[in-house]
Amino acid sequence: MKQLPFYFFILFLFVSCSKIRKAQIEKNDYPDIFPDYKEVHIPLNIAPLNFSIKNASFIQATFSANKQELFTTQGEKSIDIPLHKWQKLLVEHQGEQIDVAVSVWNPSYPEGIRYKPFPIYLTTDSIDPYIVYRLIEPGYESWHEMDIRQRSLNNFEETIIVSSDMKEKGCINCHSFCNYSPSNFMFHARTSQGGTILIKDNKVRKIQLSQIGSPTEGTYPHWHPSGKYIIMSTNTTRQSFYSHNPNLIEVYDLKSDLILYDIEHDTIIVDPRFSTPQHFETFPSWSPDGEKLYYCCASAKELPRNLKELKYAICSVSFNTENGTFGEKIDTVYISADKSASFPRVSPDNKYLLFTESDYATFPIWHKEANLKMISLQDFNDVNIQILNSPETESYHSWSSNGKWIIFSSRRLDGLYTRFYIAHFNAKGSFDKPFLLPQKNPNENILRMKSFNIPEFIKNKVTITRRQIDQIITD
Amino acid sequence: MKKRIYILLTLLAIYIFVIEYIFYPEYILRQESEGLFLTTNDYLQNYLFTPGSWILLLTNFIQQFYHSLPLGLFIETILILSSTISMFLYLQKWEIAHHSIWIISIPSIMFCVYQNTWGIPALLQYCFTLSMLTFYISISHQTTRFIYSVMLLPFLYLLIPSNCFILIYLYMCIYEWTFFKSFTMKIISISIVLLACLYPLFWQNINYTSALLYHFSPEPDMQHVQLYYILYLLPVIPILLSKWKGNLYFSYVLVGFLFIFGSYSIYKSSYCEEKEKRFAIQRYAEEKKWNQILQAISNTPYENNPFFHPYLMLALNEQRMLPEKLFHYPIFSANQIYFPANESDNANFNSLFAYSIGLKQEAIHQLAQANAMSPHGLSFSRLRRMIDWYIELKNVSLAEKYLAILQTSTCHNQWIKKRISQLSTIKKDTTFKTNKDFIIDASSPLIFLTQVIKTDTTNRKALDYLLCGILLGKDLKGFYNVFQAYFPKNTPIPIHYQEALLVVDLMFPQLKVTQQYSISSTCKQAFEEFGKWMAQRPNTNAILKQKYGNTYWYYGFIRTVT
């Protein structure tokens, strides 16, 4: 009886300390892990890169740095790296390479196979701690439920900022943040009671743009870095379905113009040059210093008949923050005879312009050929970023506040469900191999029935509550 | 006494089983096909912390086992019988069960009668409520009762809708006043009721949800909710009847009366009958049982129901009988080729229609529409169909994705194994025939079908739909133009087309139709005779209907929409 506590203690030790196994076979190849985190460059504050291996019955992963083993973790179908061990590893070995030696036991190798250790490169660059995105079923005209959510990049915490179903609040979309600030952002709520929801210094209000001078409600917004203005396009959007084209859907604008919302004076400023029927203007975006506006522009065409002739270029115009006026001269920053550009985004150091390119039209998420493209704003030459692209769609993207990371949408996993990839922008002015946004359970990337949409970095957590937002929307 | 209860329960079980088997077999099967239970995060997040959702989650779990009719009938019988058993256990506590056994059969009969409007969540909620109340009454120790009632708060709020949750606490309060009569607990029970009323507000501060704070029915869009909650007054009866001695034989007579009343109500319910018919037709269409669709609708009053016309046309076309038998049915418009996609069932049909004419991509689009408009955002039958269609399209990635999702359910192991072995033999196909592609214009069925034919002139099913649709619109010139352009040469001409060509020949003799196309002498003779009878109208109306009621001629010249 007296020995009982001792035996319980031994049992506890036995259960808690899993035995390290040794695989009998060695293979000089990297393991086929999902997601593919081999040879990626990661920020010093990213969540653990949990991964799985198909058909595995047992996986063991040993993390080492400078040939010194740090810790080993095990799992049946996937590796779940303990958060505190991972964070300690990132802090203590920033700027170094870590090696991950994976051993797998499966029906083909019941005695275990040990693969060649693969490297992960820890950078000294941090990443913004949160991203905000929308989750929605991948396309078609109806949807069941959508949310705008925030996710911590340091761990796996995900919370809902605002949620909607078709009957309740209608579509909620086009969130935009002022200078990565979680307390200054906006989005549109498209229900009959909705409008443009503006959160400024954590105070919510609803605006009906059409009642303060806009010809219609706004669509794609971008908040001026000064916080004084929001540029928006106003789009009359249509959707068509292909019978056989693997692109499935074509989304196009019958009309699109630009409007400027002056937040302080609660008025709309319309520059007539950006609201002519002869041209479509869309996807406006400010330079980081707020002195220039970039936007996509195309000559108007009869649609959908002449869809394939519709090519958007990227233009820029200077902007006077004091009086909210645009310069006289409009420059064409990028134009192509056989490609169409979308989502121009200038890097925080003002040196590069990253955008999405597709064969024609706008709304590239439905174009399998859509890829990311970047030009230097010094000499307007192409920068080779092929490492970011895949045979499937690459589309919406955002720069982190320090300009060292981008996050972008890609459908490379299955061609339909959009997932986020993060890539490091290194000191040489090129990108490193992108990696999939880590999930606690890697299979979440497969099992999740919604697409990720419009990723935006923010510097801290959004603290305004869902209740506050819901009250304003339905008011 | 026990023996009588066992006999009653056995009789009730047989009664319920027979009622379900005769009147609700399609309802049973539809529980699984329209249901969905997964263990993905996406799915569970919608239920775990949403008030009143656990009962829906439990329902979804149970519905999985309705995939075979015998198993579904068995489970449904057990569930409905549980309401009787729960009521019996409850009444036993009040010691009036022996002369009030007719009361215990009321819930079962009512759930049978209102099967189509009160689903499994309503049934489970009722059983849970009675069980909790029974358990409460059985606790003699007042502190234990107090702890039980407080600890149940968070559990009950997540389990059942808030009005039922508050009702349970109201009952507990009533018991303290009438059954236990403990002074302390009388006061405390009132406080607990108030706490129950305020609990939803408290919960919103912990875990805000934009779902209704106080909601009323156990399932979305439930009908006859007030009548359902009248069942919740049954637990009050023992309090009122506690001193009544009652008459045993009177109780038996009442039970018999309830059996007859229930059966008669269900038998006479045209709503139930039509619902069953709709479910059956939808299932036959999904399972490609075209003959059964025709058998179920032909020569029945359902022929005149516009809801069934798209299914009729689809079944006829799949059997290559559309241009042979279309005018045997009271179909009057090409708009009945498919539904406007404003409801889940409509979009579901449209996906079958698109698939039948070879537009698999559009079929999947319509399936996605049906999903978006359905209660769960997806269903087992549509998920299975998506997997099979993606396998046909050789889209390995998406087929694997949906298989991985389906694998998180409980009853699909064999089905999934078979598909995995199919997938292993498929190579991904990314070829795309640009010459067959077009942007779909679904503003009208005829425009849509014309697009299909123009890009694929060999698509006979689409052609028959188009030609028959044009005939429904009585556009003979249009019919002739399409027929001439696309009908395959040297192919036997179906009867309705021959009938129409004869009329074209009559109205446009310059086209010399009968010289170009082979029309049978029987048809020509019949047309001549038709002409003679037509000349003698209205005296010959009856003969015309009898002899030519199933021809295009009767439709084109005489039949009007009734």
Image (tube, coloured by chain):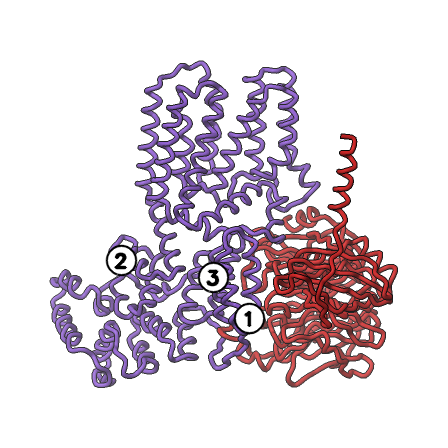
Chain colours: A red, B purple
User: What's the residue at 67%, 39% (across, down)?
Assistant: B203
Are the residues at dot 3 and dot 1 in contact (C-beta closer than 8 Å)? Answer: no
Q: Is residue A420 visible?
A: no
To the question of a shared chain for discs 2 and 3, the answer is yes
Residue B170 position, x and y percent, is: 57, 26
Q: Nearer the viewer, mark 2 or mark 1?
A: 2
Assign a secondary structure to mark 2.
Answer: loop
Disc ID at residue B298: 2
Front residue of this view, candidates A1 and B498: A1
Mark 3 — residue?
Answer: B385
Assign a secondary structure to mark 1.
Answer: strand
Assign a secondary structure to mark 3.
Answer: helix
Disc ID at residue A249: 1
Front residue of this view, candidates B241 and A172: B241
- Could you tell me the amino acid type at mark 1? Ile
To the question of a shared chain for discs 2 and 1, the answer is no
Instruction: Locate residue B325 relative to residue B176 in the image: left or right.
Output: left
Q: Is residue B533 visible?
A: yes
Q: CA distance from mark 2 to mark 1?
A: 39 Å
Query: Callout 1 environment at 10 Å: few (<14), some (14 to 19), or many (20+)?
Result: many
User: What's the residue at 46%, 42% (across, down)?
Assistant: B119
Of the 4 image quadrants, the one containing the N terminus of chain B is top left
- Could you tell me the amino acid type at mark 3? Arg
Up the image or down, B160 lies above or below A183; here it is above
Chain containing the residue with disc 3? B
Instruction: Locate residue B204 relative to residue B163 in the image: left or right.
Output: right
- Could you tell me the amino acid type at mark 2? Ser
Up the image or down, B541 lies above or below A428; here it is above
Q: CA distance from mark 2 to mark 3?
A: 28 Å
